[in-house]
Image (tube, grey):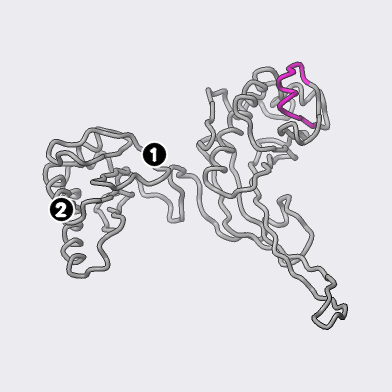
Amino acid sequence: MVTLSRRLPELWVMAGQAQLRYGVVASKVAVPAQLGSGWRIGALDPAYAAEVLTTQVCEQLKAMAAVHPDLNLGIDGDQLVVLDPPRKDAEILAPWLEQLATVAGAIDAAAIDSWVQPEPPLRMRFYQHPDWYWVGEDDSLLETTPVKRSGYDHGTKDVIRGRDGDGPPFVAFVHEWKTRRTESYTDSEGRSQTRTVVENHSETILGFQLPARMPYLKVGLRGIGRGISFESGAFNDQFAVHADDTKYAYDVIHPRQMEYLMANPPATFECVDDWAWFEVDVHSQEVIGHSSHFLRGFLSRIPRFVWRNLGLQDSPYPPLDLTPSRGA
């Protein structure tokens, strides 16, 4: 990585057989004539890419590709990042680094001040999720979240907090603990013995804070039991809904909400007081993002009178045309 003088939007430049990194959000844009064939450019805004890739920048990129044919370069904030440098050969690496610095200098010289990005908070963040941040460990969560209580040596890891836009804030982490049991066995001399076995366990916790305390409601695929019967046979065949208040369930799971659920089946989730907890097996950015997007759409489809009955003046989540795709 080489530091740039300004924080800029992302831009991806690939030559030869270089591949765009998995998960990157970018559109293919036109390759400048100065680069010639064999290149691929990715950016969110083609106008930005055109202003960055000046003749001087293109000349320096071509010089680098002459030494490193599968050049894979990207702008990440105020860093110019290149994958797979020739680090095993010092005689090649030294001039190659000088070329990389020259590319950075050419980008710094480009007239692109209108694209400068604001300085983000000093914390570990997530790609395409500016309001997510990494916590790491926070064992106080063991007292306030629905973790398993059995065993001993409980702890948290990979704690993430954040929200997506105006969606509900979330907390996600892995809970680890141990259990101990005694088992019998027969030793090599045929005698009965006992030994203590320690087993390690883990579970994924994902919860979203709701804007009001809500009556208990659990929604999941039919495997969680028969549940409340709704007017849609197709919905009843696919989902099971459990609630302490049947009328409340009918108010929330109305025909339009059923259509949304059937089109975008989520992981099983339950609303308990002012939290919605999702039953997920994987702790990943993809799972958190998909659940966040789904829940925002679910909450936006709860009628206004329900929110008013819960003590709010209006819906905290205005209706949006949200159709989350799997893995979004």
Query: Do the residues bearing badges 1 and 2 touch, measured as CB atoms within 8 Å?
Result: no
Residue at 69 percent across and 35 percent down: it is 212
Residue at 50 percent across and 47 percent down: it is 132
Q: Quadrant of the N terminus?
A: bottom left
Foreground mark, 1 or 2, reads 2
Give me the disc on residue 66: 2
Give me the disc on residue 306: none
Query: Quadrant of residue 297 in the image?
Result: top right
Report the Cα–Cα distance between label 1 and label 2: 28 Å
Position above or below: 153 against 13: below
Residue at 31 percent across and 55 percent down: it is 83
Q: Amino acid at mark 2?
A: Ala
- Judged from the image, the secondary structure of the residue bearing numbered disc 1 is loop
- Determine the residue located farthest toward the front in the rendered image: 189
Q: Nearer the viewer, residue 245 or 202?
A: 202
Q: Nearer the viewer, residue 303 or 26?
A: 26
Query: Quadrant of residue 275 in the image?
Result: top right
Q: Position of residue 46 (x, y in %)?
A: 26, 33
Within 10 angstroms of label 2, few (less than 14), some, or many (20 or more) residues?
few
Query: Quadrant of residue 198 in the image?
Result: bottom right
Q: Position of residue 40 (x, y in %)?
A: 25, 40
Reply yes or no: does residue 233 show up in magenta.
yes
Q: Is residue 143 left or right of residue 16?
A: right
Q: Is residue 34 left or right of residue 172?
A: left
- Determine the residue located farthest toward the bottom in the rendered image: 189
In the picture of the structure, the residue carrying the numbered disc 1 is 25
Question: What range is drawn magenta here?
Answer: 230-242
Q: Nearer the viewer, residue 320 or 151?
A: 151
Residue at 76 percent across and 22 percent down: it is 250
